[in-house]
Image: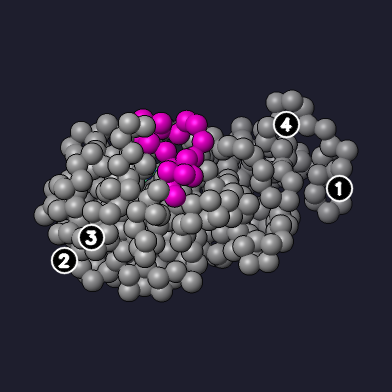
Amino acid sequence: MFKLGSLSLQSKLFLSPLAGYTNLPFRLTLRELGGLDLATTDLVNARSLIERNPKALKLIETSAADRPLAVQLFGSVPEEMRDAAQYLESIGVSSVDINMGCPVRKVCRVGGGSAMMTETDKTAHLVKGMVDAVKIPVTAKMRLGWDDENLTAPDLARALRDVGVSAIFVHGRTREQGFSGGVNLAGIRAVVDAIPGTPVVGNGDVISPEAARTMFDQTGCAGVSIGRGAFYNPWIFRQTLDYLSSGNIPTEPPFAERIRVLRRHYDLMVEVFGEQHGSRMFRKVGPWYAKRFGPAHHFNKGIVSIATRSDFERVLGDYLIWRQQFVDETGELKPNYQPPPMVASFMEEPAVARRESIPVPKGPVEVW
Ligand SMILES: Cc1cc2nc3c(=O)[nH]c(=O)nc-3n(C[C@H](O)[C@H](O)[C@H](O)COP(=O)(O)O)c2cc1C
């Protein structure tokens, strides 16, 4: 379905790296729901990886079910990026992605992330060193450019194609834009046109199967990568593949299935990070599931302070009892349910998400 260098992927949909979220539990949860093949880690500092820093090793933690896997590296020292890529290949990682889009000062200051988009020759040299050193595919993830006056993505894409990258992932915004405004599909199209024959994966604001279709149709991209839409709707990959092949709007999973997947994600979190840390990490994950539960403030209030499994079970159990006042015998919201204004924004949406935008999660990575 999608040829990425030597890899034959079963899906043209990809998971975008989301620092703090695209960890092993999330990837496994998504993979089990279908429609996703190549998934990625959060960005990892190349030097930390070479030094076998325990935090960096935790970021690339994986399992047999977590295949094929891409690891996203950031860094600006060619030898470090090369050595990190070789290490990843030696431990069986399927492909290496290079972060050229991160606008966070800490990353740009040392010449990584978005700063790489401003120095085409230097960046191409670094990438060539990686491509020449490994057999696995090397890809690059960029924005459209530093700002509107410097839309360098097409030129950079050409330079990277010439040194052998297997695909370009492009988020259709500039670094200056952060997450404001809409995604610029014409900007992505310009990258597609710049490197015919090399796959370009479009990214940005895909939060429904219809939005994915629009991305494919208007940009001519070979694949679509989904970030925030995946934690807003973990079923989005399966739903999108179904929609693209049949044209039918997929039905939303029932409430019971949403709870099953929430639980599964929590269990994996505890398995990978331990009960205490996993529970704490789940505090910011739970509310994303709850956005599609209908009335959920009771749940959100409790989930943000869980520290143990019994906290989790108590919050979920109490919530399910509290929610009964709003539902019919099938567990779905009563047709006449009228949310109070405060809750309306969290209301479950029709068959497929039609929100025009999804919030950027709070935290130090707000500017991604
Ligand atoms: C919380 C958060 C963390 C992110 N972390 C990364 C990252 O580690 N590496 C990266 O290349 N992009 C990162 N991004 C950018 C996303 O991969 C993606 O390009 C962007 O969110 C647009 O796609 P979306 O609208 O589907 O979310 C991050 C975005 C967010 C919101």
Can residue 256 be found in the magenta stretch? no
Task: Provide the residue designation for mark 3.
Answer: 162
**Secondary structure of the residue carrying numbered label 3:** helix
The 10 Å Cα crowd at callout 1, few under 14, some 14 to 19, many 20 or more, is few
* In the depicted structure, whether residue 307 falls above or below residue 35: above
**Residue 227 point in image, percent of width and height:** 48, 48
Give the Cα distance between marks 4 and 1. 19 Å
Amino acid type of the residue tagged 1 in the rendering:
Asp
The mark lying in front, picked from 1 and 3, is 3
**Residue 134 point in image, percent of width and height:** 20, 68
Give the Cα distance between marks 4 and 2. 53 Å
Task: Please give the count of numbered marks on the rendered protein.
Answer: 4
Furthest residue in direction left, as rendered? 79
What residue do we see at 74% from left, 25% from top?
341
Query: Which of the marked residues, 3 or 2, is nearer the chain's N terminus?
Result: 2
Task: Provide the residue designation for mark 4.
Answer: 344
Span shown in magenta: 172-189
Which label sits on residue 133? Answer: 2
**Secondary structure of the residue carrying numbered label 2:** helix
Relative to the observer, which residue lies in front, 270 or 57?
Answer: 57
